[in-house]
Amino acid sequence: MADKSYKTVIIGGGPAGLAAASSAVDSGLDAGDVLVIERDNVLGGILNQCIHNGFGLHTFGEELTGPEYAQRFEDKVKERHIPCLLSTIVVDISTEDGKTAREAGREKNPKKIVSAMNKTDGFFTVEADTVILAMGCRERPRGALNIPGYRPAGIYTAGTAQRFVNIEGKMPGRKVVILGSGDIGLIMARRMTLEGAKVEVVAELMPYSGGLKRNIVQCLDDFGIPLKLSHTVIDIQGKERVEAVTIAEVGPDRRPIPGTEETYECDTLLLSCGLIPENELSTQLGVELSRVTNGPVVNESLETSVPGVFACGNVLHVHDLVDYVSEEASEAGKRAASFVLHEGENEEDGTVIPVTAADGVRYTVPSSIRIGHMEDLQRIRFRVGAVFKGASVEIDFNDTVFRSQKKKILAPGEMEQVILKKSDLTGFDGLKSITIRVRKNEDI
Amino acid sequence: MKKTELTCIRCPIGCAITVTQDDDGKVTDITGNSCPNGYKYAANEVTNPTRIVTTTVRVKGGTLPVVSVKTKGDVPKGKMFECVKAINKMEVSAPVAIGDVIVHDVAGTGVDVVATKNVAKAQA
């Protein structure tokens, strides 16, 4: 028996969780029926350590730093008196009768049981009609990168270094090599340089950067820090502390090319090699994950394969703009509220249209659209798998081109989107599938 | 005539902007921006490049050891290090609220430095 019952429980109090919570209340739920559970002792998540500016231009029309942006959303949650449990970790989400909700069937929507613990309440469970997954993501650690060499002190993920510098006020090192050109790595190259460290080089395995172009300009170019594409770390020297790092160029097969080795004396190696959505809880619950994004597979309502369980933000797919996280999370909050308030309605049109990624598009969110549940405008977000210049993004309905849009540049580091109208879908006779693809110019 | 290709850094969209200047360096055309901020950025970048500087300041008696801060407006790109140096010399006492001025006229730029995070007083 659960200790308390809620309409919506939101796992995670970062940007996604906070936006989802306010939106759920704005969409008709009572604040007291919504609960946010956050494992840190403050709300705002990773935004608290992202002290650089550039957040919120979409949402607020002004340029904010991460902590300021987080505060705006925290204020929204507080103004609505939405309960938040801090320093509380969720250890399990399951369904009432022990079956996954999918086994139980859609008609019978079993309550979700969220098990959590903290210092004051110990172990406890809460019951929920809907759950919004907003756990965010974590950085790929050294262990997942297969870097040879010793394991001395001085090797950090870029985000760990960011926490040290920006929240704890400590410098992790003075001479730095960065592996990976993810945004956090680029931001930390600038941050540590401004604090007096020397960033020797940023090495990126791929032939293109994983971060935003603007971050290469303002974090590397501004400070004359070299970015070496198609390079990786092949050795770490030093037994107690990092003493030097050797990088080498890699061929198209991504294997080091002998004779291209360069050794940099340094005391710190930062890793910015990608982010992985944190889906352990989702997996336990039986939520189907995408093998491309490592996030849940969702429909137009951002609802996972388990009915009544929604996902948004970086736990769903890694974003580069927090503004888009907030937007997506607001949608999830609204959909969760609607699930609670209008359960069983809109079921008459059962048509499900799969949305598929092809030719250069790696994935789409959502990956299916139930026309009966579609709103007037449907956003489809996606990422491409390589850099394309002067190509077009093509939306195919069944096997014919529905719309094609020219793009100056498409890059893996930048999330893209297309927007479809409901009338686009309902007006197309015999629609069976939607495909998003990149069409190179010479193909046209 | 001179054409400069820039990536706008005002927001994460990162528009590709082309600035055309005449032989005297006067900006004659700006294309590729998608907002007025981008226009302003591009015009500045080829004549007098500026940046917002963000860093941290030590806090005494707070729930956190440092508070994040930013320059309230743009400062000349060449003065970034000077600004951080001046800011690093400061120490403030908790509580600190978003918008509190931490340094007036940092490094002679005429720009103030303000807090970007709330830091409460630590419980005694």
Image: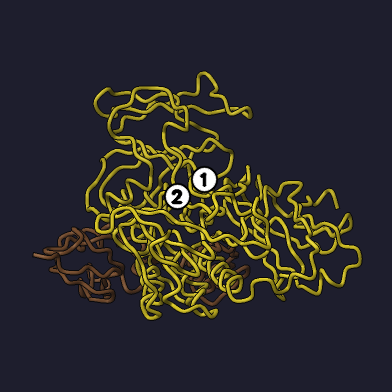
Chain colours: A yellow, B brown
Q: Nearer the viewer, residue A156 or B90?
A: A156
Q: Residue at x 44, y 47 (%)?
A: A138
Q: Mark 1 falls within which chain?
A: A
- Residue B26 appears left or right of A244: right
Quarter of the picture holding the N terminus of chain A: bottom left
Please provide percent x and percent y for residue A83: 37, 71
Q: Is residue B28 visible?
A: no
Q: Nearer the viewer, residue A65 or A84?
A: A84
- Residue A267 appears left or right of A382: left
Q: What is the spatial separation of the Cα atoms under label 1 and label 2, in whole angstroms?
A: 7 Å
Mark positioned earlier in the residue sequence (1 or 2):
2
Q: Are marks 1 and 2 in contact (CB under 8 Å)?
A: yes
Q: Nearer the viewer, residue B63 or A181?
A: B63
| Tag 1 secondary structure | helix
Q: Which residue is mark 2?
A: A92
Q: Residue at x 51, y 62 (%)?
A: A132
Q: Residue at x 51, y 61 (%)?
A: A131
Q: Residue at x 47, y 79 (%)?
A: A30
Q: Nearer the viewer, residue A80 or A142?
A: A80
**Neighbours of disc 1 within 10 Å: few (<14), some (14-19), many (20+):** few
Please provide percent x and percent y for residue A436: 76, 55
Residue at the extreme top of the image, as rendered: A258
Q: Vertical placement of A272 versus A352: above or below?
A: above
Residue type indicated by callout 1:
Gln
- Residue A341 appears left or right of A426: left
Q: Which residue is mark 1?
A: A284
| Tags 1 and 2 both on a single chain | yes
| Tag 2 secondary structure | strand
Q: Vertical placement of A162 versus A38: above or below?
A: above
Res A67 quadrant in image: bottom left
Q: Mark 2 falls within which chain?
A: A
Residue type indicated by callout 2:
Asp
